[in-house]
């Protein structure tokens, strides 16, 4: 339990780590944003393909993998269709900080719930190395998310301190949902495989719906592709180390 709490906390607080560059750099180049997002995508694909999916089959079978993965995709699709997504570049003129910031905060709260559940389910698995692997993958995804949130808030004329606090709050929601996922899976062992498959589906949806298109839309496709492959390999090595 202590390991699960620590892993979910570090993964969730990676959102705050993503805010750090804004404290020292006023503007991050489009190329570096694309490269970082693609690197994150590679990490998440690797964790899903080589970690979550095989373990889901091992714990609950191929049917559980199919049902859980589809459920994860459908839930994320539902969230994406009904919750506003952060779009920094198309909203540079925001001045009503409080109402817009509240909207963004609510959106990220809801987006972070499936990610937290993914971490919790993974720590409840009988494969000890899976929890840290997924926590690293989710944490890597949280860092560019925190960066985007910080840029949005700075464009909305928020203070740097407020950006850090709001990033921490979104991370807190992820940690709470991770704890819920952990206790749910621990109490009902037969749902662990479904939970792992759900996590894989949620992560793959984020990759193909958000991260890859975002990293290939500004003319830096080649750099982003290499970054994606590098991120995938890094996670393979991490998986081997923890395994």
Image (cartoon, rainbow, N blue to C red):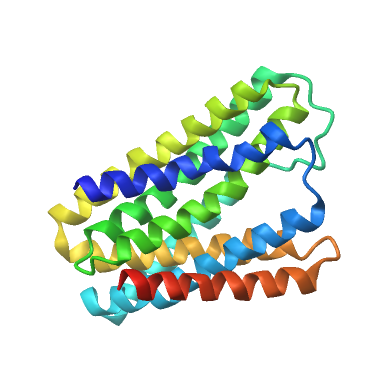
> Considering the image in quadrants, where does the C terminus appear?
bottom left
209 or 132, which is in the foreground? 132
Q: Residue at x 66, y 58 (%)?
A: 36
Residue 61, located in which quarter of the rendered image? bottom left
Residue 17 shows in the view:
yes
What residue lies at 44% left-to-right and 69% top-to-bottom? 47
In the figure, is residue 135 to the left or right of 150?
A: left
Which is nearer the eye, 136 or 108? 136
Q: Quadrant of residue 104?
A: top right
What residue do we see at 54% from left, 63% from top? 205
Task: Residue 110: give x, y in percent of width and height.
Answer: 48, 41
The residue shown at (46%, 38%) is: 171
Please say if 30 is above or below 220. Answer: above
Quarter residue 28 falls in: top right
Looking at the image, can residue 84 be seen?
A: no
Residue 153 position in % (x across, y down) = 69, 29
In the displayed structure, 232 sits above or below 131; it is: below
The percent coordinates of residue 169 (x first, y second) are 47, 30
Figure check: 241 above or below 149: below
Question: Residue 85, image x and y in percent?
Answer: 65, 44
Q: Is residue 201 left or right of residue 19?
A: left
Counting every numbered tag in the picture gives 0
């Amino acid at each position: 339990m202590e390991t699960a709490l620590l892993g979910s906390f570090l993964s969730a607080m990676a959102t705050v780590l993503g805010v750090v560059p804004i404290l020292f750099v006023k503007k991050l180049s489009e190329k570096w944003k694309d490269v970082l997002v693609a690197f994150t995508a590679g990490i998440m694909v690797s964790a899903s393909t080589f970690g979550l999916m095989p373990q889901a089959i091992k714990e609950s079978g191929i049917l559980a993998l199919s049902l859980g993965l589809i459920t994860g995709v459908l839930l994320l699709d539902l969230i994406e269709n009904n919750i506003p997504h952060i779009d920094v570049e198309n909203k540079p003129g925001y001045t009503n900080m409080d109402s817009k910031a509240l909207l963004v905060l609510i959106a990220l709260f809801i987006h972070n719930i499936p990610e937290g559940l993914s971490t919790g389910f993974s720590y409840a698995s009988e494969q000890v190395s899976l929890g840290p692997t997924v926590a690293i993958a989710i944490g890597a995804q949280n860092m560019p998310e925190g960066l985007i949130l910080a840029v949005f808030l700075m464009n909305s004329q928020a203070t740097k301190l407020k950006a850090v606090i709001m990033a921490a709050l979104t991370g807190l929601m992820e940690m709470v949902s991770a704890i819920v996922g952990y206790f749910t899976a621990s109490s009902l062992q037969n749902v662990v495989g479904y939970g792992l498959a759900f996590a894989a589906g949620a992560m793959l949806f984020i990759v193909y719906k958000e991260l890859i298109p975002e990293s290939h839309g500004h003319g830096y496709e080649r750099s982003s592709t290499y970054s994606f492959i590098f991120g995938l390999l890094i996670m393979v090595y991490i998986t081997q180390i923890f395994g």
